[in-house]
Amino acid sequence: MPGSRWASASSGTVRPDEPADPSVADQGRAAGRLPAYVLRIPAGPYRALNPYTKFVIALSSALVAFGVRGWTGPLSVLALTAVIAVAAGVARSLRRFVLGTVPIVASILVVNAFLYPGATDVLFTIGPFAATGTGVTVALQATLRVVAFALSVAVFSLTTATDDFLADLEHRGTGRRLTFVVGSAIRTIPAMGSRAVEIVEAQRARGLDTEGSIRRRLRGIVPLAGPMVFGSLAEVEERTIALEARAFSAPVRRTVMRVLPDGSGQRAVRWLVGLGSIGAVAASIAGRFPLP
Amino acid sequence: MAWLSRQFSTRVIVLIPIAIAINIVLGYTVQTILKLPIYLDSIGTILVGVLAGPIAGALTGILSNLIWQYAPVIGGGTIGPFAITAGVIGFLAGIWGQLGVYRSRPASGTQLMAFAGIAAVIVVALVVPILGNPAYTNPDIGGYPDWVYTAAVVIAIAAAIAVAAFIYIRRDLAGFWVAIAGVVTGVVAAVISAPISAIAFGGVTGSGTDLLVAAMRQGGSDVLQASLGQGLFSDPIDKTITSFVVFIVLGGLSGRLLARFPLGERLVRNRAA
């Protein structure tokens, strides 16, 4: 009976002013009608948490890593991230993200260790450059901050499916336009990447110089950017029509079928972690943070 | 509110994710394939700003950097904190779009010559105060390596010639405004990026421009001054090139397509077809 089906589906909709907690009864009713893959909930330690909880933890970690000066901020974030990564079984995948920070870490270490302004406590000298104790301390702290930040975001990204995160945000009342923009951007990037490879190869076949002098390479910008932008703008028209045909700009909210479990425990964790990190940063800025 | 919702028509909502992908992929391609020491990661942001408006542009910039940081597979860099800079770049682009900066302005004869000349003078004039920045000239700091100064002067002269030639050869006064929009965007971006880089990353960015940071520190600048000096050197160049790339790309698009975007009419006013 189509009528009752729509009625029960729309009763599962949560408006922004209602509590975000889906009731068990709603899920049970929906379970009878939706295919299993829609309702499959991510399992395993940490992964099973609601995406929003993981997001708040990642955001708070970033805040603490950058906001709490000295050793405590970055080190505690690094420790927390390591524990979570091991528990969730993503520690191995983190190696790639650690490698991704190598260029900036190398730069931080060299520039700060040898060229820290005003530092006089020389440790050793190489040629005209002297490494200072102050500089090395600053460099190591900045390195820890960068790695801690990159890894906390990486753990969030590795333990949370993008679609789950976006579905949960929409369920909580985030506008459909914003979730579409983010989801569509993440899906478009790989396609754009393969298009970029094709364009580079096509232009190389036509004599694009990628090895010559800087002037010759500067001339390559428009042959690369042009086709990429023209090609993608041509898609805008088709996608716009496709979306409009599917009631994208309709003034009503869309029903989110995939509702991920959340609970008062997780809500408490979110508030605790969020407020705690803000408090720690405030204390650090005010100079009242007790640890080094 | 009408002003805001006009910026987010369905067409713009479709354009923003594509612009974000262009930012990320093109920025990556230019840095790795052409191996140029510029970022070129704001073409999509400026495109959206110019076509849709300041808020849409700002949103594109902010989301670009956040998604670049987060997205599975390509993420994991350290670009996230610069989302603030990217947002401001997009906002400024929206203002340029509303002012019609990227509109073609055909001209000829004396007017063309005059604007080409004035453009060259202004580019040099804009570089002088940058060189006069305390990061470079504060006597307490004791100066900085000569090659930085020489490089800046050489690039300023080359840029002045390039801009004047662009205006003259294309017979289009828009080149004048496009260059100014690029330089202003670059200076603002540098001023906003410097504290982010200093607080979050010890003053460096992990790219080739860090050589400049090192040179200025060697000359005696402090962390913030060295980052600002590096930014004021790199960003105006980067954003001016980006600005011209966007102008060339917009010039290659049909008026019919452009006019459908919220600010499209400001771009096509002087076009024949």
Image (tube, coloured by chain):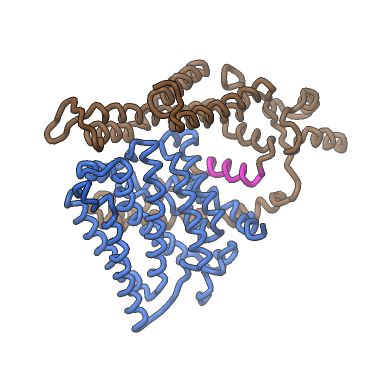
Chain colours: A brown, B blue
Query: Is residue A117 magenta-colored?
Result: no
Query: Is residue A186 magenta-colored?
Result: yes
| Residue B253 location (% of width, % of height) | 49, 64
Residue at the location (38% across, 50% down)? Answer: B191
Q: Is residue A1 above or below residue B24?
A: above
Q: In this view, does B163 lie above or below B109?
A: above
Residue at the location (45% across, 39% down)? Answer: B80
Left or right? Give the position of A81 relative to B207. right
Q: In which quadrant of the rendered image does the C terminus of chain A lie?
A: top left
| Front residue of this view, candidates B22 and B68 | B68
User: Residue furthest toward the bottom?
Assistant: B109
| Residue A151 location (% of width, % of height) | 44, 27
- Magenta region, mostly helix, strand or loop? helix
User: Residue furthest toward the left?
Assistant: A127
Q: Give the range drawn in magenta.
A: A175-188
| Residue B136 location (% of width, % of height) | 25, 52
Residue at the location (85% across, 36% down)? Answer: A7
Q: Is residue A291 above or below residue B127?
A: above
Image quadrant assignment for residue A171:
top right
| Front residue of this view, candidates A271 and A102 | A271
Left or right? Give the position of A228 relative to B129. right
Left or right? Give the position of B134 relative to A68. left
Left or right? Give the position of B114 relative to A124. right
| Residue A259 location (% of width, % of height) | 70, 30
Q: Can see residue A149?
A: no
| Front residue of this view, candidates B255 and B241 | B241
